[in-house]
Every structure is written in structure tokens, then in C-alpha cells.
Image: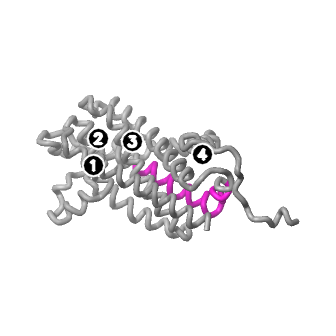
Amino acid sequence: MAILSAPITRDRGRELSRAAATGVLLYRNYLVYRRGWIIFLTGFLEPVLYLLSIGIGVGKLVHGFDVGGRSVPYADFVAPGMLAASAMNGAIFDTTFNVFFKLKYQKLYDQVLSTPRTTSDVARGEITWALLRGGIYSAAFLLVMLALGLVHSWWAVLALPAALLIGFGFGGIGMALTTWMRSWQDFEFITLGTLPLFLFSATFFPVSAFPEWLQWVVQCTPLYRGVVLCRELTTGQVGIGSMVSVVYLLVLGVIGTRIVSRRLSVLLLT
């Protein structure tokens, strides 16, 4: 009886390197999702359907837009936006809904922290898993773009790392926000934030369509930086300004990861 009521204590077993500890959590997630391939498939199909219906369908009625001083067809304009949105959705879904369930109901992280693993290991493992999921979506979407003739530059090879960077930024911030969630109703704020980002981050029309003051607001949002970066890579309009988006998303992901580590320490170790 005394054993059953004893508090959970940390096992002083074998220590692992950061990479190995991250790999343990990745392998655990792989085992859970290896039979849930249809969940991954639905996440990939959504941006493809948007591309076919709006980019190609509506694109028949819309003239191209200017990108870096060069006019591109509407489908070429929309496709990189869908690529960036796909990376965002994959990362956000995994680091919000799934992490909340593991944290509040499954109590997975309590079990992980009873071993030599740390809250930083948990943060790296979950965010890396979200990156892998977003990366799979992005790689498949790039193949669709290539098959439809929507890729016009060798710079597009870097669109996959760019998509991973977008996933890193949104994964870090998404998981950080999840640590403050109190119930499933709070996830309405996630939808309230991601839906306007999806619609107004120059995914379907250029930012110049907004009033000048609103353009500044849009240009400061993370998905806009991701859309611009992917569009510059797939159309070959890469410049020094592209580094602004890279640094922005990298800093966003690092800040999110650090917040997650500290918040998990407060929630689970104090």
C-alpha cells in the first residue's frame, strides 16, 4: 500500500545524449502513429485541394501577379503559399491538440520525466516530431507542384528546408501556447489565430492589396515570412531580403522551444 501511494520519483538510470533522448520520444511517436497513416494523408490532401480548386481553377479567371519584378501565373503564385500553410498546419496540429492530450489527460510527460529525461528533451522531441510531420507534407506537396509544372527554379530545392523552418517556428510557439491551455475550449484561440494567418498572409493575393498601414502588420506575421520565402525559392527570386524571413522563423522557433522547456518545468516539476 505504501508502494502504491508513493510519489513518482526520477529514475537515476542511464543518461542519454540530447540527440538520443530526442530519438527516444520520436520512436515512441512513430510506434503510436505507424497504423494511423490516414491521419497523415488527410493533412496532406487539404493544401492540394486548395491548390487545385483555387490556384488552378480560379486561376483561369485571374491574371498573374508580380513577384520580384516578374509576372507569374496565378497558380505559380498560390502554390508556394499552400506549401507554407501546409507546413504551418502540420506543426500546429501536432504541437497543440496532441501535446495538450498528452500533457493533461494521458500524463505522458509525467512518465517521461520520471526517467533521466528532462523537460528540454520533451520539448525537442515533440517539436522535432512536428517538424518531421510537416516535412513529409511539404515534400509530398513539392512533388505535386513539380508534376503540375509550378516549379521554375533550382532554388526550389531549398523550399523543403524552408518548410521545415516554418514548422520549427510554428511548432515552438504552438507548443508554448499549449502549456497555458486550460481546456479544449481554449483551442478556439488557436483557430482564431491560424485562420486569419492562412487567409491574409499573401497566400491568395499580394500584400499590396491591403492599405499601407495594414501591409506593415501583415509583413510582421510569421506565415507571411514563410510564404514570401517559399515563393522566392520556387520562382527563383532569391535575394538578401530572403535572410530576413530565415532569421525571423529561426528566432521564433528557438524562443518557443525555450518557453516550452521552462513551462514544462513549472507545470510538472514544481
Residue 41 located left or right of residue 46: right
Q: Is residue 96 located in the magenta-colored stretch of the structure?
A: yes
Q: Which residues are magenta?
A: 88-111
Query: Identity of the amino acid at label 2?
Result: Ile
Whether the residues at callouts 2 and 4 have beta carbons within 8 Å, the answer is: no
Q: Residues within 10 Å of mark 1 (few under 14, many from 20)?
A: many
Name the N-terminal-most of marks 2 and 4: 4
Q: Residue at x 39, y 42 (%)?
A: 48
Q: Is residue 153 located in the magenta-colored stretch of the structure?
A: no
Name the N-terminal-most of marks 4 and 3: 4
Residue occupied by mark 1: 245
Residue occupied by mark 4: 25
Residue 246 located left or right of residue 69: right
Give the spatial CA distance, label 2 vs label 1: 27 Å
Name the N-terminal-most of marks 3 and 1: 3
Name the N-terminal-most of marks 1 and 4: 4
Residue occupied by mark 3: 48
Asked if 185 appears above or below 135 in the picture, the reply is below
- Mark sitting on residue 148: none
Query: Identity of the amino acid at label 4?
Result: Leu
Residue 259 located left or right of residue 182: left
